[in-house]
């Protein structure tokens, strides 16, 4: 019964997000169905609107994001005319070609209007309309400038990654657009994609190091390719990280000044995720530099092993001088002047050849496929998991006491923690950081928390709370009051000082 309830809840709550995710694909299929049969009596029916749309998006991404400039209609006209001549062998008079380009451009930007996508919202039980644009414009100094929208970039990236560009840089350009359009929830999803790219590069670096350990030639080639195709992007990626951090700081200041609490919470989550990503990216850069040093050292050792001398001429000369016996040098010089040209063959070798058994079997090289550990976790992920578990247990124990007794104090709560988890709880830093997060609000409504989490702590609690606990505490509301005159001391030496708190059910 509970599983059915969860399924129905997922269908209702996730449908709107799924439809909004699908909306960015809608303009492409509308445009690809647009034929040229009605235009000029089907004279240009062989043109492919889907291909033209994709080419237009790639052109705008190149100009807007990589070159950081908006384009005029004349620039787009030159690009599209070149495309039509090259791909479709278009050959018309100039006026007809320019008229065709204008028709195509009007279709792609939908005459300046948004494409409308209708869907049914099961939670509100009514039809809604989502709007999406691929191209937008603005007027600067009397000139109309065009740029690709966030939806246009997301759609293009979803179909295929941009070749010969850093995926991290491309995703950061999308993140920049998300922040500028104040779509902070979408920005968090983009950061998760950046984290995946950083993890893939870290794994690729480890594979190169493993290859160097058993195949120095292939490893040297892989190391060189890794440095040429990945390390060259690090500087640009780091600059984009700093640029996005600055944009987040501006958005945070703006949200605080205008009093948008919901936006402040989303920006805080976005900033936290971006900081984690920057740390991982910094570690990747450091490890890549170490990889270069290790590769150079291993390649150098391999060269020395191959060039190791079989005879030490310097040492032999030193011995001759030490013992005053220059005649010994003849043993070194004579073979060079009088090489022995006659060769002999030991007859006994014939018997060994006849007695030996020929092995006619072909043996292939055994290649071991290394399996990746799907459960591998980084140190910060382990720490995050521990903190989430501790916060959840501490919060649920607080709910249990308030639910049973209607109220409790911090000293009583800490005594309960000691009984539940032992005296070492007083030296656990997670307890005090939990109290700091808990004190961010003075009222907690468990019913409202199930629908929306305002703080970092609420998000952790709701993600880790089991279904029975949700049903038990679903209607619980409690308030927190602070007695600043009363300071409690904890720890073996009373080194931890905490303002007294009271928790009362409403």
Image (cartoon, rainbow, N blue to C red):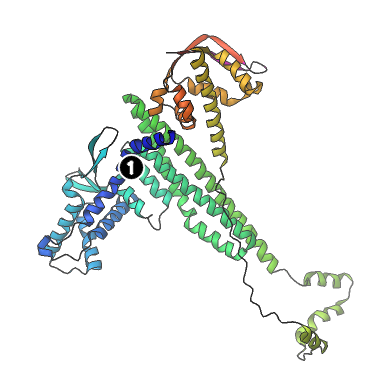
The answer to if 498 sits in the magenta stretch is yes
| Span colored in magenta | 490-499
Q: Residue at x 38, y 32 (%)?
A: 266
Rendered location of residue 54, percent (x, y) = 28, 56
Density class for disc 1 (Cα within 10 Å; few <14, some 14-19, many ≥20) is: few
Rendered location of residue 86, percent (x, y) = 25, 67
Q: Residue furthest top?
A: 485
416 sits left or right of 341 in the view: left
Can residue 171 be seen here? yes
Instruction: Name above or below for residue 297 compared with residue 319.
Output: above
The answer to if 462 sits in the magenta stretch is no
Q: Which residue is mark 1?
A: 18
Relative to the observer, which residue lies in front, 150 or 410? 410
Q: Residue at x 35, y 45 (%)?
A: 174
Q: Residue furthest bottom?
A: 342
Asked where in the image residue 192 lies, by quadrant, the reply is top left
């Amino acid at each position: 019964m509970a599983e059915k309830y969860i399924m129905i809840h997922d269908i209702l709550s996730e449908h709107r997000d799924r439809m909004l995710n699908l909306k960015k694909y809608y303009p492409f299929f509308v445009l690809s169905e647009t034929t040229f049969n009605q235009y000029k009596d089907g004279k240009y029916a062989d043109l492919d609107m889907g291909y033209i749309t994709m080419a237009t998006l790639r052109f705008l991404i190149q100009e807007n994001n990589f070159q950081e400039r908006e384009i005029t209609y004349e620039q787009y006209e030159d690009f599209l005319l070149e495309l039509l001549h090259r791909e479709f062998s278009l050959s018309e008079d100039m006026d007809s070609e320019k008229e065709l380009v204008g028709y195509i451009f009007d279709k792609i930007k939908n005459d300046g209007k948004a494409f409308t996508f209708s869907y049914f919202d099961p939670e509100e039980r009514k039809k809604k309309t989502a709007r999406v644009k691929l191209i937008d414009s603005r007027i600067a100094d009397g000139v109309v400038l065009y740029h690709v929208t966030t939806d246009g970039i997301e759609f293009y990236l979803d179909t295929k990654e941009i070749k010969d560009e850093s995926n991290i840089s491309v995703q950061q350009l999308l993140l920049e657009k998300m922040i500028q359009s104040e779509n902070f929830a979408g920005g968090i999803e983009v950061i998760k994609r950046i984290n995946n790219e950083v993890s893939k590069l870290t794994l690729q670096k480890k594979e190169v190091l493993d290859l160097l350990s058993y195949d120095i030639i292939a490893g040297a080639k892989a190391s060189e390719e890794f440095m040429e195709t990945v390390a060259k992007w690090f500087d640009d990626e780091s600059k984009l990280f700093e640029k996005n951090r600055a944009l987040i700081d501006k958005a945070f200041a703006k949200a605080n000044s205008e009093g948008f609490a919901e936006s402040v919470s989303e920006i805080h989550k976005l900033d936290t995720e971006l900081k984690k990503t920057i740390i991982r990216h910094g570690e990747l850069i450091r490890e890549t530099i170490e990889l270069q040093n290790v590769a150079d050292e291993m390649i150098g050792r391999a060269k020395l092993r191959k060039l190791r001398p079989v005879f030490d001429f310097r040492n032999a000369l030193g011995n001759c001088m030490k013992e005053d016996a220059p005649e010994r040098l003849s043993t070194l010089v004579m073979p060079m002047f009088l090489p022995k040209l006659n060769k002999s063959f030991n007859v006994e070798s014939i018997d060994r050849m006849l007695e030996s058994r020929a092995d006619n079997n072909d043996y292939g090289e055994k290649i071991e496929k290394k399996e990746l550990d799907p459960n591998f976790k980084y140190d910060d992920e382990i720490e995050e998991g521990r903190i989430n578990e501790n916060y959840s247990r501490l919060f649920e124990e607080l709910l249990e006491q308030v639910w049973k007794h209607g109220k409790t104090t911090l000293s009583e709560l800490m005594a309960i923690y000691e009984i539940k988890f032992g005296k070492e709880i007083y030296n656990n830093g997670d307890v005090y950081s939990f109290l700091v997060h808990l004190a961010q609000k003075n009222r907690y409504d468990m019913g409202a928390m199930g629908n929306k989490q305002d703080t970092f702590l609420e998000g952790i609690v709701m993600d880790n709370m089991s279904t029975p606990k949700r049903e038990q505490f679903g209607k619980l509301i409690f308030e927190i009051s602070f007695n600043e005159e009363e300071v409690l001391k904890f720890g073996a030496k009373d080194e931890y000082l905490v303002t007294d708190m009271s928790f009362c059910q409403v």
